[in-house]
Amino acid sequence: MELKIKALSPKLGKEIPFPSYATAGSAGMDLRACVDEPVTVAPGQRVAIPTGFAIALPDPGWVALIYARSGLAVKHGLAPANCVGVVDSDYRGEIVVALQNYAGEEYTIQPGERVAQMVITPVTQARIDVVEELDETARGAGGFGSTGKA
């Protein structure tokens, strides 16, 4: 699968690296803050962090998903405000990471800092079939906690 990336900032590829995989086994590529100066995020605050690039997925059979970087989330409480960002195959604008500070202290994002990771994965669009009844299962309509604690 080929992912086309367009630089939207002159810093990308020079001062700030393009998205890349940290290791051969990485599922997600690191996304970096393409900002001119540090951005301080207060506790509870949400910020939109530009990445300086746009992408072109090959067709509707692909999606880009934006996830937290576990180290940033665990150590500093910063994670995507929408939990997982969804970049549809027909979107051509800049990839922007919405981060929220869930910690009790402020955190300052540095220019070029890795702020999220992007996973490219296949997607299937469901064919919708509106019905009067659904088939029965052992679980039925049992929801939150209905299958036990362990």
Image (tube, rainbow, N blue to C red):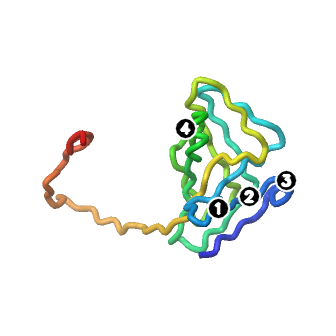
Q: Which of marks 3 and 2 is in front?
A: 3
Q: Earlier in the sequence, mark 1 or mark 2?
A: 1
Q: Residue at x 57, y 34 (%)?
A: 77
The amino acid type of the residue labelled 4 equals: Val
Q: Earlier in the sequence, mark 3 or mark 4?
A: 3
11 versus 150 height, above or below: below
In the picture provided, is 78 more to the left or to the right than 83?
right
In the picture provided, is 38 more to the left or to the right than 117?
right
Instruction: Report the residue marked by disc 2.
Output: 53
Instruction: Report the residue marked by disc 3.
Output: 15
Instruction: Report the residue marked by disc 1.
Output: 21
Q: Specify the quadrant that holds the C terminus.
A: top left
31 versus 5 height, above or below: above
Q: Earlier in the sequence, mark 2 or mark 4?
A: 2
Q: Which of marks 1 and 3 is nearer the N terminus?
A: 3
In the picture provided, is 74 more to the left or to the right than 41?
left
